[in-house]
Amino acid sequence: MPQGPDIAPGRLSDVELAHNFSDAHPPLTHAQAVVEAERCFYCYDAPCIEACPTGIDIPRFIRAIATDNMAGSARTILESNILGGSCARVCPTEILCEQKCVHNTREEGQPIRIGMLQRHATDWQMEHGGQPFARAPETGHRIAVVGAGPAGLACAHRLAMHGHDVVIHDRHALPGGLNEYGVAAYKLADEFAQREVDFLLAIGGISFEGGRTLGRDMTVASLRRAYDAVFLAVGLAGVRSLGIEGEDLDGVMDAVNFIEGLRSSSKQTVPVGRRVVVIGGGNTAVDAAVQARRLGAQDVTLVYRRGAENMSATTVEREWAQTNGVTVRLWASPVRLVAHDGALAGVAFARGGLGPDGRPAYDPDDTFVVEADMVLKAVGQTFLPDPLEGDSIAISGGRIMVDETGQTTMQGVYAGGDCTPGEDLTVAAVRDGRNAAEAIHAAWMAAGK
C-alpha cells in the first residue's frame, strides 16, 4: 500500500480505532428479541420466505424465539443457511425478507427486524449449542472445493453432512472468502468470520489447504482426476480499471485491495490519506469510504457516475456512509487523475445527467476537481477465466455457465457463487453451494454409489 506525507498509518489512537471498528450494530438482548418476535404474525405462505434466497422458514424460527426455543430457532435457520450468522450481519435484509414483511402494509409500517432476530438465534447456537448437525457415516467419496468463501463453505458443510470428505483449496491463508477479507470490519467484528468458520468445520470431514491458486498450483482437470467431484467457488478475482489518465499514480489503488489489507492487518499499520476519493456506487465503495473515514481520513468523498436510484449500494448503506461523515456526490464521471509535481493531487470529473434519449450524458467542458491524496477505485469486479483455459468449461456473459443443478459443461464439475450468473449476494452464494452439494449427493445416490 502506498505511503507518503499525506498517506500514513496510525492517524488515530488504539482506543479510537477499537471504537471505530467495533460492532456497528450491537445485538438485541434476549428480552428485546422476544418482544420483537411477538410482533410477527407468523404468516401462512409468508412472503418473507419467498424473498429469502435460501428459503429459511422465517415465521417458524421467529415463533421459536418467542417461545424461548432458541435451539429450535437456530436449527431452522442453519438447516437452510449454515452461514446464517454472517448473512444476518452483511446481507441487505431491508430489501430482501424485511421488504416483503406484511407489517409494511400496516399503518405503523415497521417490518419485523428479521436480520437482527436471525443474528440473535445463530449467535445463541454458536455460544451455547455447538454444531447442531450430525455427520452421516463416511461414504468414501472425496470432493474438491475451490474457494473458501460462502459458496464453498456452504457446499463443503452440506457434503460433509452427507458423509463425504471435502478438501477446500483457497489462495488465502485463512478460509472465509469475502467474509474474512472483503467486508467492512465493523460488520463482522470480533473475528466473527473465523469463529463462524470454526463452527462450520466442527462437523468434521472438511480440511482446508491455503495458499493454493487455481491455474498455478492446480487445474480443474487435475482436480477432477484426483477427486470424485469438483465445486468451483472462485468468485470475481478481477477488478475493473477506470481507463483514464493518471491511474498509475502513487496513491491510486483498488478498493478491494484496500479493504483486504485492512482486514488482514492491524488497523494501526494501515495507511490512509488525509483526503480520500472513492469512485463507485456499490457496497464495496461504501465499505471503503467509511473505513477510510474511521481510520482517520479527514475528508472522504464517494463519487458515483449516476443517480442515487442507480447505486447498487442500498439506501441504508448510502445513509450509513453519510452518517459516518462521507460526502456523496452523484452524476459525476471521472475523466482524469490530477497530478502536481508528479504526485496525486485530485480527480477531475465531468458533470452529467440524463440526456434527451434517457441515457447518461456527460459534458466534457463542464468539469470540477475533487482534491485527493488517495483514490480508491470501486467500479466493479469481474470473473477471470484464465485459470480455466484448457478445461471444457463454458463461459457466457463473463460468468461460468451452469445448469439448474449447478453443474458446468464439464462432467462432475459444479460451480456457484459470484463466478456464476445471478445476484452477487452472500446469501445467494450460500444457496448455490448448498444446492450444488445436494445435486452432487443426489447424483451419487441415483447411481447407487
Image (spheres, rainbow, N blue to C red):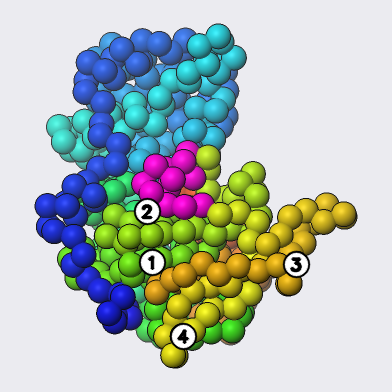
| Residue 207 visible in rendering | yes
Q: Which amino acid does the dot numbered 4 rest on?
A: His
User: Which label's residue is closer to the chain start, 3 or 2?
Assistant: 2
User: Which label's residue is closer to the chain start, 2 or 1?
Assistant: 1
Which residue has dot 1 on it?
275
Decide if residue 383 is on the left or right side of residue 7. Answer: right
Residue 290, numbered circle: 2
- Of residues 308 and 435, the one nearer the viewer is 308
Identify the residue at image location x=26%, y=26%. Answer: 28
Point out the stretch of residues depicted in magenta.
316-328
User: Which label's residue is closer to the chain start, 1 or 3?
Assistant: 1
Which residue has dot 3 on it?
363
- Of residues 388 and 307, the one nearer the viewer is 307
Decide if residue 312 is on the left or right side of residue 358. Answer: left
Q: Mark 4 and mark 3: span between their CA atoms?
A: 24 Å
User: Which label's residue is closer to the chain start, 4 or 1?
Assistant: 1
Q: Given contact means CB atoms under 8 Å apart, are the residues at marks 3 and 2 in contact?
A: no
Q: Mark 1 and mark 3: span between their CA atoms?
A: 26 Å
